[in-house]
Image (cartoon, rainbow, N blue to C red):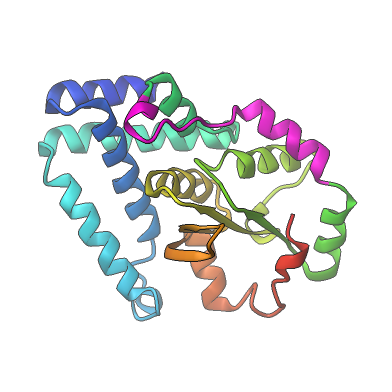
Amino acid sequence: KSLIRGLEKISGLSHFPMYRVFEDFCTVCSCSLHNAFMKVPVMARSYYKEQYDKRENEYLEVIKRYDKNVFGTYFPQMLADLTRLLLESPKDYLGTIFMELNLGKHFNGQFFTPSHICEFMAEITIDDGFEKAISEKGYCSVAEPACGSGAMVLGIVQCLKNRGYKQLGGKLYIEATDIDPLCVSMAFIQLSLLGLSVKVIHGNSLTQEVFETWDSPNLQMANMTGYFNKKSINKSKMI
């Protein structure tokens, strides 16, 4: 509810429609998280530099629309609230807000799968193959070809948490794809805040087109150290 109140407050003070505020919140949060290591010298000189510059420009373009006090007061607090909620219980909060505020009519009539359904699907899908992958190569690969706001992956995280697994950033390599850029932002934010190693792909899973990729901060560091590249990622064994 605190996130919805924040969006309503920003909308009222800035005179922007709710869907615009929600989209802008997702843009600035995803850009900020993506560029978390931008000022680390070794990362700033890496192959991420071009992406860092692009995300920084996208961020600056959005914040120009808002009063500095409004932006500085509400956007960081909302991100902090979302982080706290995810750490307490990894559920699809952004997708839920999207549905509660009836924003689907502005974004192609989208509907997001409820968290309890995603958790149920994870419970009946993840078997001893997960533990086998962990014992053999140290991590398990996960592919989600139509990720939406990341609800299915969040269901997997909750399932593994229920089974006693911790620190999943090194135990899961995740590729999550969606054709909608807003969904890409929502999924990237929530999965990054949980410290997961995820590549969120703006693309078309049916045609295999890739328009843009977003590597979470954890995956950026893993790529720089070669954590996942030391062993091949076999997509045929993705769950």
Whether residue 124 appears in magenta in the rendering, the answer is: yes
Whether residue 159 appears in magenta in the rendering, the answer is: no
* Residue at x 43% of width, y 19% of height: 100
Which quadrant of the structure image shows residue 53? bottom left
- Near-viewer residue (116 or 71): 116
Residue 17 versus residue 66 in the image, above or below: above
Q: In which quarter of the image is the C terminus?
A: bottom right
Q: Quadrant of the N terminus?
A: top left
- Near-viewer residue (195 or 173): 173
**How many numbered circles are shown?**
0
Residue 72 versus residue 5 in the image, above or below: below
Left-right relation of 121 to 132: left
Work out which residue is located at the far front of the displayed protein and give it.
207
Residue 73 versus residue 143 in the image, above or below: above
Q: Position of residue 46 (x, y in %)?
A: 39, 80
Q: Where is residue 183 in the image (x, y as percent from the top left)?
A: 44, 44
Secondary structure that dominates the magenta span: helix
- Near-viewer residue (112 or 233): 112
* Residue at x 17% of width, y 20% of height: 12
Q: Position of residue 8 (x, y in %)?
A: 26, 21
Q: Position of residue 84 (x, y in %)?
A: 49, 34
Which quadrant of the structure image shows residue 156? top right
Left-right relation of 96 to 64: right
Residue range highlighted in magenta: 103-126
